[in-house]
Structure formats: structure tokens, C-alpha cells
Amino acid sequence: MILLSWNCQGGLRCKIDEVKLIIKKYLPHIFFINESEINPQEDLGYFAIDNYKLIINEKHKTCRIACYVNNKIDFKLLNFTDKADIIGLEVDNIKFYGAYRGFTDKEGTSASSQLDEILSISSEPNTILIGDLNTDPRRDNNKWNGKKLKDWMIKEGMIQLVKGDTRRRVVSKSNGDMKLEQSKLDLILTNTDKDICISKNTGYRSDHFVIIAGMDCGKPIKMTRKSIIRDYTKLTQHNINRHIITKPKIINNLDDLTTYHREIADKLAPERVMRTRDETQYINPRIEKCKKRRDRLYRRYKKYGDPEDLIKVKEESKNLRRIIRKEMKWIVQKKATADNPKAFWKVVKDVQGKTKAPDNIVIDGQTKLENERDIACRFAYFFKEKIEKLTKNHQRLRDTTHIMDDLKSKRIIEPITETEVEEASRKLKNKTSMGIDGVPTRVVKHATKQQIKIYTKIFNEILMQGMPEEWKTARVIAIPKKKNNVNIENHRPISNLCAMEKLFEKCILLRLEKLNMDSIAGKHQHAYRKSHSTQTCLIELVNCIAEHLDEKKKVSLYTVDLSAAFDLLRVDTFLEDNYNKLPDYLLWTLGDFLQNRKFFVERNGSKSETFGLDLGCAQGSVLGPVIFNLYMKGLPEAVNSDLTVSYADDTYVVVTGDDWANCRTKPNETE
């Protein structure tokens, strides 16, 4: 199928002969003409072309867009609107929209609202939007509406196919000099999986090019999914500091700082929609070179039809698969032999398929969800309902207002220093994850040297007044925890928090680490502590069992796994247990961190509604592990045992006795 679009400039009546020449040359199936300036009341016979049907939007007094459709095409005409110049056709389940938007208001409708109407009508799956929108996506100012168009493209998964400028004109400057003005106003936006080839042609009486799109309505390209990604290759410490030095900005508060950091991220790591194939999971220059060579041969075969080119394409595809398999094997071997245990177990989970996000979700073994928005909402409801079921018979949360007020009144705040901020930044992970602020952690980390004074000022204000509401809202990602990751039950919620919040938490963590945490949090916990691991936990457990066996005693080992341990943490119990054991200002800050939290689930750019949280500590936060250890410190006293050791939420209880009956009754004597 051949699709054309041309801004004829001056009206179709003046350019009808050139339109006939274009149709004769390209034989298009659909031809959209912008600035046609047709009056629906006049005789349309003048615009008739053999074997083509003329379509206009008769709801307008002057139709600024017209469409010629080949009589051989079986199409369905979509509904018109009187708020924008747009024509819609449906062919083979693909919706084609031709649109024109001028700079000036039209029949009581502003130019900006015309663009909104066009974008809202075109927000459907399997859609191709083509035409002169007088909107250049490369320009962000209000006149060109580039940011509005770019945000809409990201939201709807649209890809802009036209490359280079589509309009050129010579204009006279105020000093009399001549200037060549170029812009990209004629666009083709699509979210289909069809193979579309784009070309441009000029030479007709208009400063706009003729846009030619050739597409195959048959077999779609093999795709896995569309993803919104950022290219972080340019988001380096050097580029971030250079941006801050060359484009400084006055920052008075946290909102100004967050906006500035977001501008840096958008400039150095812009968002874009990427369609990923199965083979692109492993990429290196050799693979890229082989792919380009194969694609080049395939384009030559499509153009000339030489069967030898097709044979070469198949050989290159076979070679590409061989290279990818070799690359996959090399990566797995390298990670599996690494000294880092996390890298090793990540490879194991990758091979088992536990970390791959599913394309759909099954609920109760029956209902199947594929829409990203529906999946995100269902995850949010599942996480919320899970906590409600586990706490159904629990005592209601006690009011902590009096404790927080008491801590606030008698606290003596030790201001955070620039040295502490610098040390916290150095220990902050160089990651690209972001919360609802849209700022990657890497930006905050690398900008510390240039902005350390404003960081310190903001952190001391928060230490005095409490955390802002934005910091208490978590962007939750559902991470598979079992191989059968299609079931919604086999996922855990991981919270992505604001980047500045992570740095602030790191500063508080440094203060807590200066205290004697062994006496405050207990020694039974082997997770989230320096010089402790699963190995130290196992060594202590085995030594205890061996000692009692040497004494000829009976030994029983009980294992306890706490369900949703982080999510059931009670702030009232935490504050009461640690009252007068931590500095008042630190305990008040931790209590403020735990209270009035919210979350929403995001999946591939689609978000659920936001829910409030009365319980729990955010998984993925910096302070979460320390708070959990402080909360669970009383576990050994609550269990009547000879030894209680824990690693995170897994607990092992050793009970000994002279006979097995004593070993069975002793653990039941708990508080």
C-alpha cells in the first residue's frame, strides 16, 4: 500500500494539475492533501480524478484537508469532527488519519486545542497519523508544541518515521539578508507493527515535500514489545557537571532543585519509545555490524528482487544467530564465575526464567490480563488486599501523635554537614532508577560536588520540618520471584523512591551506623549488617547444634518464614520499642519516614491509581533494612529457645532438651 501526504499551499484548485501528476507518478492508494481550502458548497466536480474518490470534512466551512482514495480500496470512513481538520479511514484493521493544524484559530477553536483534538482522536492502537501538524517535535517552545507532541508520543507508544526536514523556504531578515528556513512539520506517526518505508520528493510548487510511505499490510515485523527507555550513555559525571556550570540556575528550594535535575536528565538522557526484538537482548558491535549487513542485503533484495541477495540474507541471519548464542554463553560464563555472589545468583535466576517480566498475567488461574494499565491496577489491588488479609484479625494501629509530638518537642537536632553529604553521595549507588520525581539517582550523585551547599541546606530543613509528601509516594515495580511469573501471586513489590530522598536516607544511615547497633538492634540478625552474611548465620547455627550434640542432648531445629515481613511493620510498635534507645531527632525522623506513605504500581509506562499505606516499610529504601532490624530486635526474647538466629525474614530456632517431649513443648512457651 502506498500512502502520500502533501501540503499543496494555496489551495487544491490552484494545484489540481500537479496533484494529478503526483497521482499518475506514484499511483497511491490514499493521498492526503493539506491546505486544500475547499468550500463544501461549491461544485466538487472540478476536483474529480479518474479512479479516485474525493473525501472532505463537510462539517467545516472551509476544508483545509482533502483525501483521494483509490476506488480499488475497500475502506470504512471514520467519524468526522468539527473541532479539527482531520479525516479518518480504516483499511485492513489499520486506522489512517490525515490531519492539518494551522497556527491560527479556526471557527472559534484555538490552534492548541485543535492539536489536542487531533491527538485525542488518533490515540488508538494500530493507528497511522500523517499530515502537516505545524508542530516540530525537535522544538519545545509553545509556538511549535514540540513537548506536547513528544509527551503524547511516549504515552501512546508512537514512533515518528520521517527523517530530516520536510519544509524549506527562503525568508528575508530584518536587515535585508536572505535566510534558508528549514523545519520538520510533515510527520508520520504510528504505533503499528507494519514495515513502513518512508521517502520524500520535492520539485512541485510548494515549499513542503511530498511524503511517500510504502507499507506491507501482510505479515508484521517480529516484535516482542514496545518500551519507553532512556539512553544513559551521555549521562556521565563530566556531562552533568558541565551542564551545571554552563547552564546555572538559581535554586531556592527542593522543587527548584528537582525541576533542574529533571531538566538535566531529559537533556542528557531523553526518553524514547523502542521496539525490541528477541535478538537484541545481547548487543555488541559485532552483532550490530552483522544486523546492519543483513538488513542492507534485505533492502536490496526488496528493491531489485535478486534471489542471490535472498540467499545471502538467510546466511547472514544464520550467522547472526550463531554470534548471539556465543555472546549469550560468554556473558553467562563471565557472570557465573564472578566473585560477586549477587551476580552469580542473578545468572541462575535468569537461566531459570525467574527475572523475565511476563507479557500477560493470570489471576486465580483463569482470568488473563494483557493490557498494561489493567495489569498495573491489578498488581496494586493484589498488594493492597494481601496486607488487608494478613492484618484482618490484628489489633488496630495505636495513635502515635503523642509520641511524635513528645520527640519533636525535646529533640536536639545535630545539623547535617557538607562532609556527611559528600560521604553519603560517595556511598550512594550509581543507578539509573527513579521515583515519581523523574530524576535518576545518577544525576543527584554526580551533581553533589557542584550543589553540595544547597543539598545540605535542604536536608537540614527536612530534618527540622519532616519529609515532603512527594518523597512518601513510592513508584512500585512488580518483580518476579518464582519461575512461574505469569501468576500474580509470584511477584514482590519493589519501591523506587525519589533520588534526593535516597541521599537524605543515606545521611541518616551514617548517623545510625555511628551508634552501637549491636546493642540496640540485637546480635541475632545476620542480614543488613557489616561483616555478616548467610555464612556467619550458618556457622553460628551449626556450632550451637554441634555443642549440644556433644553434650548428648536432644536438638530440634525449627524454621520460621515471616509472610510479608517488611509490609507488616507497625510504626506504633517501632516507636514504642525504640523510645529512649535512639536519639530523639533520629527516632522522630524514622517515624516520619514510616507514616502517611502512598504507592502506585507502574508497568511499561502505565500507572495504577494511588493507595495509602498504614503499615510497612518500603522495600528498596535505604533505611528500610535498618528499620527492620530495629523492629525485630525483640524476637529472641519472645521465643523460648537455646538459640535464635535470623537472616532477614528467615528465622531459625534451636531447642534442646533431655528428651524429645521437652523439645516439643519448649517452643510453645512463647510470649
Image: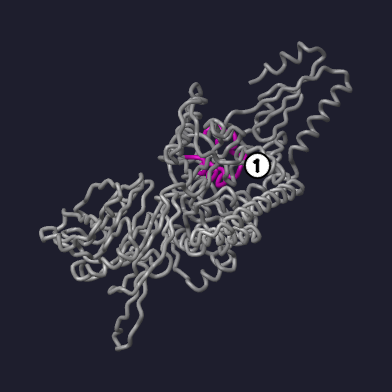
Task: Please tell me whether mark 1 sits on a helix, a strand or a loop.
Answer: helix
The correct choice, above or below, for 211 with respect to 207 in the image is: above
Residue drawn 45% across and 65% down?
251
Residue 459 higher or lower than 178, as above or below? above
Q: Is residue 383 above or below residue 302?
A: above
Q: Is 571 in the magenta? A: no
Residue lying at the far bottom of the rendered structure: 176
Q: How far across and how far down the image is residue 129, in percent?
A: 34, 55
Q: Name the residue rendered at 62%, 28% in the picture.
A: 562
Nearer to us in this view, 239 or 110: 110
Please state the horizontal and vertical placement of residue 418, each as a whole percent of the image: 59, 62
Residue 599 point in image, percent of width and height: 46, 41
Report the side of 507 relative to 67 (left or right). right
Q: How is the image coloured?
A: one colour
Q: Quadrant of the C terminus?
A: top right
The residue furthest top is 661
Q: Nearer the viewer, residue 254 or 68?
A: 68
Question: Splitting the image into 4 quarters, where does residue 530 fall?
Answer: top right
Q: Which residues are magenta?
A: 572-595
Q: Is residue 450 left or right of residue 318?
A: left
Quadrant of the image containing the N terminus:
bottom left
Name the dominant secondary structure of the magenta segment.
Answer: helix
Q: Which amino acid does the dot numbered 1 rest on?
A: Asp
User: Which residue is located at x 50 percent, y 29 percent?
Assistant: 386
Foreground pick, 103 / 549:
103
On screen, residue 284 versus residue 495, left or right, reads right
Number of numbered discs on residues: 1
Decide if residue 454 is in sight here.
yes
**Quadrant of the rendered image containing residue 479:** top right
Q: Which residue is mark 1?
A: 350
Horizontal side, residue 168 vs residue 234: left or right: left
